[in-house]
Image: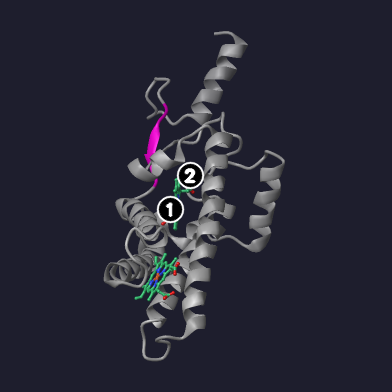
């Protein structure tokens, strides 16, 4: 065996677990559990139906959808504490310093690939969960004895819903950027739950 062959073999041994099949097909890992996936797409549908007035604002179906969305958020908050690894807040909630560092890396095209949410994505997830909660609660308040017919609460509900749409736009741009940067289909991953295993060709080791 030549020296080069020996080095290559040694490297393969060090980098690739022996269980990897000898194939060029990427190894896929289960990342998003069924709850997270169903939660995500129901949230998207619920928001879209209420926001784009597919049902009339304030009427019974709008309110029912709003409460379902609130239920989804409540369940997600519990799942964030007790769910599987990548669903947990501890897996993707990072310090402001780490988030800024990731955004800086992103501008320099040096942002690493993550199996779960990246630090900036994690911050957006938490923001989206909180703002969705505020949209639902403000909607509910417009129907209570305290705020029934109170104009500013109705306006607050509408403004929060518009703000949420702006956040969703940034969220989708972030997803598109990460898809392009790491050459993977993250939207499909939110459907199948699977992502490509980390490899040496990734921009940086995944966390
Ligand atoms: C995902 C959750 C929700 C979204 C995205 C949403 C979105 C909206 C939007 C955009 C409007 C303003 C429509 C317009 O006047 O142009 C609206 C109005 C309204 N929503 Fe919601 N809503 C949600 C949840 C709720 C909930 C949970 C309730 C009550 C139980 C509620 C009650 C109302 C009422 C009463 C109005 C009419 C207020 C008015 O007269 O201006 N909404 N909603
Ligand atoms: C109402 C609109 C949307 C809301 C409120 C929303 C909210 C969220 C939330 C809360 C998560 C975190 C999932 C979790 O850990 O539970 C997430 C992740 C994700 N969303 Fe959305 N989303 C919306 C629209 C979309 C759309 C339209 C797309 C497709 C382009 C999309 C693609 C994704 C992807 C790919 C992830 C995983 C990101 C990653 O790999 O780190 N989302 N979204």
Residue 207, visible in the rendered structure = no
CB of mark 1 near ligand 2 (< 8 Å): yes
The residue under the point 42% across, 85% down is 149
Q: Which residue appears at 54% of the width and 8% of the height?
A: 1
> Residue 80: x and y, percent?
41, 63
Query: What are the residue bounds of the magenta stretch?
Result: 26-31
Question: Where, by quadrant of the figure, is residue 197 drawn?
Answer: top left
Residue farthest to the top, as pictured:
2
Foreground residue among 133 and 190? 133
Contact (Cβ within 8 Å) of mark 2 with mark 1: yes
Q: Which of 77 and 52 is in front in this view?
A: 52
Q: Residue 115 carries which label?
A: 2
Judge by depth and name the residue closer to the eye, 16 or 71: 71
Q: In this view, does 165 lie to the left or right of 106?
A: left
- Residue furthest out toward the bottom: 146
Label 1, on which residue?
Answer: 86
Q: Is mark 2 on a helix, strand or loop?
A: loop
Residue 151 shown left or right of residue 30 in the figure: right
Instruction: Decide whether residue 28 is among the magenta residues.
Output: yes
The percent coordinates of residue 49 (x first, y second) are 35, 58
């Amino acid at each position: 065996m030549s020296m080069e062959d020996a080095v290559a073999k040694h490297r393969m041994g060090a980098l690739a677990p022996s269980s990897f099949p000898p194939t060029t097909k990427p190894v896929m890992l289960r990342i998003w559990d069924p709850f997270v996936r169903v939660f995500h797409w129901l949230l998207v549908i619920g928001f879209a139906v209420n926001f784009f007035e597919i049902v009339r604002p304030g009427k019974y179906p709008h309110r029912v959808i709003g409460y379902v969305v609130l239920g989804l958020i409540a369940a997600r908050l519990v799942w964030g504490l007790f769910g599987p690894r990548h669903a947990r807040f501890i897996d993707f909630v990072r310090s402001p310093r780490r988030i800024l560092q990731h955004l800086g890396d992103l501008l320099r095209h040096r942002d690493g690939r993550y199996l779960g949410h990246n630090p900036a994505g994690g911050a957006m997830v938490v923001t989206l969960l909180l703002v969705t909660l505020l949209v639902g609660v403000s909607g509910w308040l417009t129907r209570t004895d305290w705020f029934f017919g109170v104009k500013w609460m109705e306006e607050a509900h509408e403004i929060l819903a518009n703000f949420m749409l702006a956040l969703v736009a940034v969220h989708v741009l972030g997803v598109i950027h990460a898809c392009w940067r790491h050459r993977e289909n993250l939207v499909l991953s939110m459907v199948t739950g699977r992502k490509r295993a980390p490899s040496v060709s990734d921009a940086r080791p995944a966390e």
